[in-house]
Image (spheres, rainbow, N blue to C red):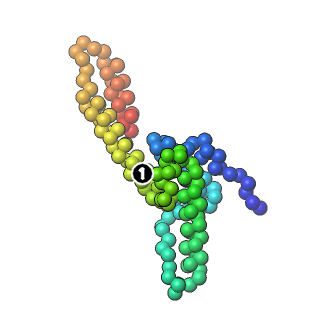
């Protein structure tokens, strides 16, 4: 029995626009899991074998590469056109690595800026405690 349910429509609605990488990757993993090729996103990278290796290993490599190509196409199709052009020569694993690296840099910068504001936060003489505490709690929540 063939499963006719396709979750790819969530990728049409939630295209990668750069700042939404984490949400987009979560959706990519959901779709890949449903399509039975999520292992290419997390698992070990298969290596190409020479002709001396038995046919089973060559077949496993071919299936892996087909699944990786399919995952890459799904990823590219769920990006904005600008991002597609920038990443069309990459495979799914390298696309994920690049966006994780960019996301980590942005998150570090944002955490630094929030921390700086938190540490500079001083209560004015004669002001109320409650607004000051709420402001500090807001910074701490954003850091989490």
Q: Quadrant of the C terminus?
A: top left
Q: Could you say where residue 22 lies in the image, as x and y percent from the top left?
A: 48, 46
At x 73%, y 57%, the residue is 3
Direction bottom: furthest residue: 52
Identify the residue position indicated by label 1 in the image.
100
At x 62%, y 61%, the residue is 36
Q: Quadrant of the N terminus?
A: bottom right
Which residue is nearer to you in this view: 51 or 111?
51
Question: Considering the numbered disc 1 on the image, is that residue within a helix, a strand or a loop?
Answer: helix
Q: Is residue 16 left or right of residue 104?
A: right
At x 55%, y 79%, the residue is 57
Find residue 66 and report its image quarter. Answer: bottom right
Which residue is nearer to you in this view: 48 or 124?
48
Find residue 130 and report its image quarter. Answer: top left
Question: Could you classify mark 1 by the number of other residues whose Cα lies within 10 Å: few (under 14), some (14-19), or many (20 or more)?
Answer: some
Q: Is residue 104 left or right of residue 13?
A: left
Q: Could you say where residue 104 lies in the image, as x and y percent from the top left?
A: 37, 47
Find residue 140 and report its image quarter. Answer: top left
Q: Is residue 139 above or below residue 100?
A: above
Q: Could you say where residue 132 lies in the image, as x and y percent from the top left?
A: 31, 21
Which residue is nearer to you in this view: 99 or 79?
79
At x 50%, y 42%, the residue is 17
Q: Is residue 102 visible?
A: yes
């Amino acid at each position: 029995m063939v499963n006719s349910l396709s979750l790819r429509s969530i990728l049409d609605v939630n295209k990668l626009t750069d700042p939404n990488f984490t949400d987009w990757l979560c959706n990519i993993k959901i779709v890949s899991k449903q399509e039975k090729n999520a292992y290419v996103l997390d698992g070990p990278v298969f290596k190409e074998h020479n002709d001396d290796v038995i046919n089973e290993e060559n077949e496993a490599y071919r299936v892996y590469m087909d699944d990786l190509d399919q995952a890459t196409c799904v990823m590219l199709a769920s990006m904005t056109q600008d991002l597609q052009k920038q990443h069309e020569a990459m495979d799914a694993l390298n696309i994920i690595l690049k966006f994780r690296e960019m996301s980590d840099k942005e998150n570090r910068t944002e955490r630094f800026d929030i921390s700086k504001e938190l540490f500079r936060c001083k209560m004015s003489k004669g002001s109320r405690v409650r607004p000051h505490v709420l402001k500090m709690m807001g910074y701490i929540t954003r850091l989490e």
